[in-house]
Amino acid sequence: MASESTRVNVPGAVSGNGWHDQDHVPGIKSELLELNMGPQHPATHGVLRLLLQTDGEIVYKVTPVLGYLHRCAEKIAEGVNYKQWVVYTDRFDYLAPMCCNHAYVTAVEKLMGQEVPERAEHIRVAVAELSRIASHLIALATFGLDMGAWTPLLYCFREREEILNLLERISGGRMLYNYMIPGGVRYDVPNDNWVADVLDFVDLMEHNKLPEYNTLLTYNKIFIERTADVGVIDAATALDYGCTGPVLRGSGVDFDCRRDDPYSVYHKFDWQVQVGRGEMGTLGDCWDRYIVRAREIEQSCRLIRQALQQLPEGSYQALALKAIVKAPAGAAYTRVESAKGELGHYIISDGGQTAFRNKVRSPSFCNLQVVEKVGVGQMVSDLVALVGSLDIVLGEIDR
Amino acid sequence: MEQNAIYELLAGVLGDGALGYNEHALEPWADVAPARIAEACRFLRDDPRLGFDQLMCLSGLDWDGFDETGKGKSTAILGYTDDGKPETSDRVGTGELGVAYHLYSHALRHKFTLRVRVPRDAATVPTVGGVWSTAQWHEREAWDLLGITFAGHPDLRRMLLDDEWVGHPLRKDYVMPDTWSGVPLQGQPYCANPFPVETGGPDQPAGDQPAEG
């Protein structure tokens, strides 16, 4: 029998087994309720199941159950050659497939020692950043939706549609592009004024649309009340749990692979890494993660503008590229900054056409784990805010 | 800090637990005795000269049939015969398993790679989940897909596969089962349509036939 003050217990300190036998309010018997959130639940952003133990509104334990989308892509990578596997990387983060393409081809090129023409790298940066904007737009929109704001969803999807149109014109696909190959990109920039249209779009995005979102959602008082001081992840926890991307930067850690572990041509451009500052509440709360994404859209616009304005002439594929790509024997871990965080590929080659082992370190997989710690002690509705602010995509968690 | 300087610090602490350093590889790595890996990781994280505060990636590996000569002739299950039996070479099923750890220090901006190798029939590695919490899920995944046991892990369950799944698919000698929960897994190794439609059956009435002439 616990003391009378058990109601204000620190939830994390309660051992799961002894809890059932305690009376939290004297005279009233209470016990933990097991609750399934998902796999078919709009707030879990895909087929994720969160197994909750709750006492009333308070969450005492969160156990994510994964694997509903599992297709063992890493096994498939051992059976198809390097070029053929690009198409599977599209299916990881299907909201930002260009970033996933970029991560994989960068890893293969490092293993091969393949040079990439400058023009191809500029095109890659432009399309990857367009993809990042599209992904962040979904993140803002669905996060608003989780918090009860319907309208921003329509606005964000309107702009995403423009990005999909632009990417369709360069790659032929609207959602899954299969656009990059080791040594370059599949197609050159189309002749139909594509560059000018993209530049028009980023101008519009930066100067018209982002202020619109800020008025609608970012500085909306209800939204701030709902997200500030909620789901606080401090920097030490974020590092311990391997959080990366906007989640890590939202906790105040100034790290971005594009700047600190440079790849491609990001070092040529002038832009800034955005970091959470705890403006509306505590550093590392849901609002900080939201605002990092919103400000990254602006930085992506700057990157696209520079990449396309400085687009060099030349080939969009390495000229010596063979039809069948072989990598010399060796192993390399390569990471890039995907829309969700650090997307790494650990490829072991035996010298042949296929990878001997291709381990994918997906950012959502690592970011989600922090829910097990930070979700404890929250209200169920705040858990929705926390999961929404992590911006997970189940395609790359389950792989 | 330079990679080989990091290894020298590590070897000074581990002694005979440090098995070697592969200096000339594309990405150098250190081989560590499996029993000492948690100790090595704790040292790498806590020493102020090293400060590895992030575990970037933890990968389970299966070295079975790996072609050491670098000619791309690694053997694994090459395909399936008509009656669904795997075509394997003699070497499959005997190689070692392993784990690779990729570390990064945010403060000092350097990386390091550790590897361990364990025999296939006694694949047990101490957990590093107490050093970096993120390792817990990576280790669950490695156990799920490769069958590497992590001693001391608090919650070593299936992660991506179903709890009742048999076997570890990323092992090179894995053979896919014929059925799972009553669902036929035909067309190995990748699935074909498990419910083929018979032509001329009730789904295709005679009126749907294309007109001739």
Image (cartoon, coloured by chain):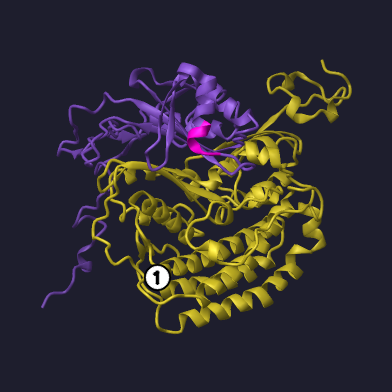
Residue B127: in sight, yes or no? no
Start-end of magenta stretch: B1-6
Q: Amino acid at mark 1?
A: Ser
Q: Residue furthest top?
A: A1
- Pointer 1 local density, CA inside 10 Å: few below 14, some 14–19, many at least 20: many
The quadrant of the picture occupied by the N terminus of chain B is top right
Secondary structure state at the residue bearing disc 1: helix
Q: Residue at x 28, y 50 (%)?
A: A81
Q: Is residue B74 above or below residue B157?
A: below
Q: Quadrant of residue B189?
A: top left
Q: Colour of chain A?
A: yellow
Residue B111: say if magenta. Answer: no
Please identify the quadrant where the C terminus of chain B is shown: bottom left
Viewed as shown, does residue A151 lie left or right of A341? Answer: right
Whether residue B182 sits left or right of residue A27 in the image: it is left
The answer to which of B51 and A46 lies nearer the viewer is B51
Question: Would you place residue B178 above or below residue A396 in this image?
Answer: above
Give the image location of residue A227, x and y in percent.
76, 52
Residue drawn at point x = 68 percent, y = 38 percent: A237
Where residue B6 appears, x then y in whole percent?
53, 32
Is residue B176 visible in the rendered image? The answer is yes
Report the side of A291 relative to A193 (left or right).
Answer: right
Chain letter belonging to callout 1: A
- Image position, residue A221 (x, y; %): 82, 61
- Residue B143 image point, x, y percent: 44, 28
Q: Nearer the viewer, residue A368 or B35?
A: B35
Q: Residue at x 18, y 27 (%)?
A: B90
The chief SS type of the magenta part is: helix
Say which residue appears at 85% left-offset and 30% top-offset.
Answer: A8
According to the colouring, which chain is purple? B
Q: Which residue is mark 1?
A: A171
